[in-house]
């Protein structure tokens, strides 16, 4: 691939060091994604400059104006401490006519809003669990038409924030307690959806117009599923010691008939298009014992850490980590926002 000037956008507190030696395990984990992307792009010959984004956009405008990067590689997860504001930075890049990697602002906004996502999926007849929204700051109203058990989570946060075994509730009293917990801890709307018992599947998708789906990936709960419900709690997803203790791992989904894999893959692409996504994304699904599949969430710009689900599923598909990042860069350069119609 042609060598590029790349502006790497990261959260202000996640600026990667030049070398990981001497850092604690916690310090390494905190910025592993940023370090992996920076070191890989640099080693591939690209000229990479890192910009830590806090709550000011002036520095971004100055760097884009003065350095004139060919593309901005977007690793932002929030802006000004607000997770739902990350798509505004991408919108600003479009206003500046600056190419960027990952999803466009509309796709980011739609997929970040879990309720809006579900409404769009329902319109397209894409199966997703029935749900009820409990707005933050509003008086409690018991939902109608939903059967227990229910799964309660934040309507906006990701990375399994606020999710634990207590997220599954079996009666109105526990539902009210958990909704209150989400309101207080996440300070966001709470979403209660019907709990789908089954296998946890992920599908990575890349592309703008023509889409590529990675192999179907599965979160195997190991011994944990013998004593607890198989759900992706924060410990399950991010605690290595907890994962080793219970034999939790991720990998290619086994024992799926080819026809089932084809249906799941096609479903992932339908979700991607329905939400107007671009660049790359990961679809989270549940596969019931009867073979039916439900879409749980769509994640724009998923975790790009080397060795994690998205990169690993790409590797199984024959795409190395360096090739994956280069493809993401090329997709960003090829994306056609409205401003390019007036060039």
Image: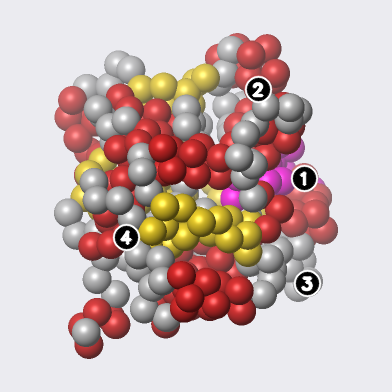
Number of the front mark, 1 or 2: 2
Mark 4 or mark 1: whose residue is earlier in sequence: 1
Determine contact: label 1, label 2, CB under 8 Å.
Answer: no
**First in sequence: mark 3 vs mark 2:** 3
In depth, the one of 168 and 330 nearer the eye is: 330
Q: Which residues are magenta?
A: 158-173
Q: CA distance from mark 3 to mark 2?
A: 36 Å
- Quarter of the figure that contains the C terminus: bottom left
Which one is in front in this view, the residue at disc 3 or the one at disc 2?
A: 2
Q: Horizontal and vertical percent for residue 107?
A: 40, 65
How packed mark 2 is, by other alpha carbons closer than 10 Å (few <14, some 14-19, many 20 or more), is few
Q: Quadrant of residue 159?
A: top right
Q: Nearer the viewer, residue 72 or 49?
A: 49
Residues at circles 3 and 2 in contact by the CB criterion of under 8 Å: no
Image position of 281 (left or right of 232): left
The disc label shown at residue 332, or none: 4
- Numbered circle sitting on residue 174: 1
Q: Residue at x 62, y 44 (%)?
A: 16
């Amino acid at each position: 691939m042609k060598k590029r000037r790349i502006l790497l956008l990261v959260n202000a507190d996640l600026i990667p060091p030049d070398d990981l030696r001497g850092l604690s395990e916690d310090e390494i984990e905190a910025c592993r994604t940023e370090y992996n992307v920076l070191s890989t792009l640099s080693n591939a010959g690209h000229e990479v400059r890192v910009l830590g984004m806090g709550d000011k956009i002036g520095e971004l405008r100055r760097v884009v104006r003065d350095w004139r990067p060919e593309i901005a590689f977007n690793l932002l997860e929030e802006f000004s401490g607000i997770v739902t504001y990350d798509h505004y930075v991408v919108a600003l890049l479009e206003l500046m006519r600056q190419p960027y990697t990952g999803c466009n602002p509309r796709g980011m906004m739609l997929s970040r809003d879990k309720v809006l996502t579900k409404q769009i999926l329902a319109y397209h007849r894409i199966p997703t669990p029935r749900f009820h929204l409990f707005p933050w700051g509003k008086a409690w109203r018991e939902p109608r038409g939903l059967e227990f058990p229910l799964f309660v989570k934040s309507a906006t946060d990701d990375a399994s924030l606020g999710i634990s075994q207590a997220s599954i509730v079996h009666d109105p009293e526990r539902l009210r307690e958990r909704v209150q917990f989400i309101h207080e801890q996440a300070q966001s709307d709470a979403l209660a959806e019907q709990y789908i018992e089954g296998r946890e599947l992920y599908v990575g998708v890349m592309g703008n117009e023509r889409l590529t789906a990675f192999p179907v990936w599965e979160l195997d709960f190991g011994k944990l599923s013998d004593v607890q419900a198989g759900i992706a709690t924060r410990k399950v997803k991010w605690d290595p010691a907890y994962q080793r203790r219970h034999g939790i791992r991720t990998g290619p989904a086994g024992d799926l008939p080819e026809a089932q894999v084809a249906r799941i893959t096609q479903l992932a692409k339908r979700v991607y298009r329905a939400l107007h996504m671009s660049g790359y994304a990961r679809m989270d699904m549940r596969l019931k014992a009867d073979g039916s599949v439900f879409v749980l969430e769509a994640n724009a710009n998923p975790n790009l850490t080397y060795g994690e689900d998205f990169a690993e599923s790409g590797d199984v598909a024959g795409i190395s980590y360096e090739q994956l990042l280069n493809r993401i860069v090329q997709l960003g350069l090829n994306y056609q926002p409205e401003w390019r119609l007036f060039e």
